[in-house]
Image: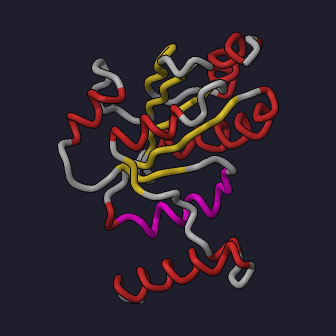
Amino acid sequence: MTGRRRSVAVAVLTLLAPLGLASAADAPRLAGEVDAKRLAQAIAQDKGQVVLVNFWATWCVPCREEFPDLVRLARENRKRGLRVVGVSTDLARDLPAVEKFLADQNPDFPNYRKASGGDDQVFIESVDPKWGGELPFSVLYGRDGKRIRTLSGKQSRAAFDSAVAALLKSSP
């Protein structure tokens, strides 16, 4: 399928899926592109919740290895007030690989792709001035929307559990 045909097919499926006229499995799994401003808006809309933002890429082996733990973490802690947001740093040309990965993982949390264009360093510094751009990289926000801590490199499920445990105990 050519790029243009794929774009048209994705657009049609995106419109038809909410109407029940296309399978949800056929619909794209990305919530769209995100720049620094839109990411801040996504985090702000979950104020009152603990938010874990994970930056990943399909070419990053540690990212792919930790992703199933993020999916389970999100599912098991949603009712306790945890929201997970994924941000793929893959290039636009890698969109099919991103969509396939998300279809295989089946996360029930939003995933965005870092917006094309713009200065990557500006984006990185807007997330965390101390972030060197390494992946995977996660940022944990408290219920007040303030950044609490960062997790650099591949994390175990136990590390994620430990990072969010105290924050989930606090009432919204």
Horizontal side of residue 50 vs 149, given as left or right:
right
Residue at 48% over, 60% down: 98
Q: Position of residue 87 (x, y in %)?
A: 46, 45
Which of the two residues, 68 or 32, is positioned nearer the viewer here? 32
Q: Is residue 83 above or below residue 48?
A: below
**Nearest to the observer: residue 103 or residue 47:** 47
Is 151 left, or right, of 80 in this rendering?
A: left
Horizontal side of 24 relative to 121 (left or right) equals right
Name the residue located 63 percent from the left edge and 81 percent from the top edge. 16
**Toward the viewer: 91 or 145?**
145
Q: Which residues are magenta?
A: 94-107
Name the spot of residue 105 as percent of width and height, x first: 65, 55
The magenta stretch spans residue 104: yes
Predominant SS of the magenta segment = helix
Q: Where is the N terminus found, in terms of image quarters?
A: bottom left
Quarter of the figure with the C terminus:
top right
Q: Residue 31 in the image: x percent, y percent?
A: 52, 57
In the image, farthest residue toward the left: 119
Q: For the point 57% across and 17% down, which residue is it?
A: 144
**Vertical placement of residue 16 versus 58, above or below:** below
Can you say whether 76 is above or below 29 in the image? above
Along the line of sight, the residue nearer the viewer: 123 or 105: 123
Q: Residue 157 at x, y = what percent?
A: 67, 28
Rendered residue at 49%/39% (across/down)? 62
Residue 136: quadrant of the picture: top left
Quadrant position of residue 127: top left
- Coloration of the structure image: secondary structure
- Reply yes or no: does residue 31 show up in magenta: no
Residue 36 drawn above or below residue 96? above
